[in-house]
Image (cartoon, helix red, strand yellow):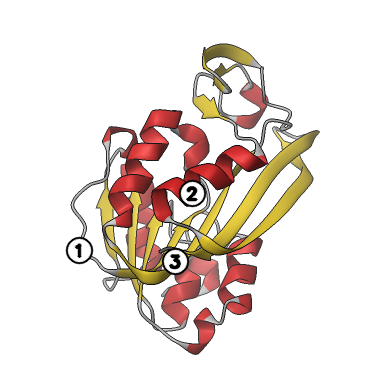
Amino acid sequence: MRPLREIRGLKYPDEFVVRHFFKRGLSERSGRVLELGSGTGNNLALYQAWDWACTGVDYDAAAIDDARHNLGAGPVLVQADLSLGLPPLDGPFEALIVPNLLCYLTGAQARAVLTAVKARLAPGCEVFVRTRLVDDYRYGRGTEEEPDGFRLATPETGEAGLFNRFYTQAGLVSLLTETLGLADRAELAVRFDNLQAGRRVGGNSDLVVWGTAA
């Protein structure tokens, strides 16, 4: 893993990925972790530092290249468009992290990916998911393409033209329960302001869910 000053892209893991990692005792054991939507590897770097074997999947070739630069030769990094389904992956995995993916998939695509990944998880796999709720300020700002799913018109976030699917808390929990058999569950609401294109944007709303897969 590179020194911090040489890291490309995000330099730190999602703060709730960090909370999950330590609160669930993942620093006290090791195994294999899979991240869907792994970007430049900032979340996998945490697992790598504690000797987990890391696998990441992302659609962006440049992000995969940066992740290889940041993490070195050890992790398995796969370029794939998850809206088209889960690529071939060697399991089983003892941890699954999905911190920034489900909002960019339709409801059917999300269900298909989660259903497919379930077969690659070890019994009792630790699961972390974070995605956007229906009270996020982006909701409704664009063209509706499915219930709670919009082609966004939000240039200030860099997401203009992208599809976003928003969840109710109950709807997300139901999806994870039905596809992954998620149990021993924690649900954390995350509401925050952010700086976007040089201006303060309020009303960001996410839900973090973690637990164990059946």
- For the N terminus, the quadrant is bottom left
State which quadrant residue 199 falls in: top right
Q: Residue at x 39, y 30 (%)?
A: 108
**Quadrant where the C terminus is found in the figure:** bottom left
Give the crowd class for mark 2: few <14, some 14-19, many >=20 residues within 10 Å: many
Q: CA distance from mark 3 to mark 1?
A: 17 Å
- Residue 44 — which label? 3
Q: Residue at x 66, y 17 (%)?
A: 141
Measured as percent of width and height from the top left, residue 68 is found at 32, 62
Neighbor class of circle 3 (other Cα within 10 Å; few <14, some 14-19, many 20+) is many
Q: Amino acid at mark 1?
A: Asp
Q: Name the side, left or right, on which 178 lies relative to 113.
A: right
Up the image or down, 124 lies above or below 117; here it is: below
Which amino acid, mark 3? Leu
Residue 12 seen in the current view:
no
What's the mark number on residue 142? none
Percent position of residue 140, x then y: 66, 17
The amino acid sitting under disc 2 is: Leu
Q: Residue shown at 53%/28% (left/top)? A: 164
Dot 2 corresponds to which residue?
A: 176
Residue 80 seen in render: yes
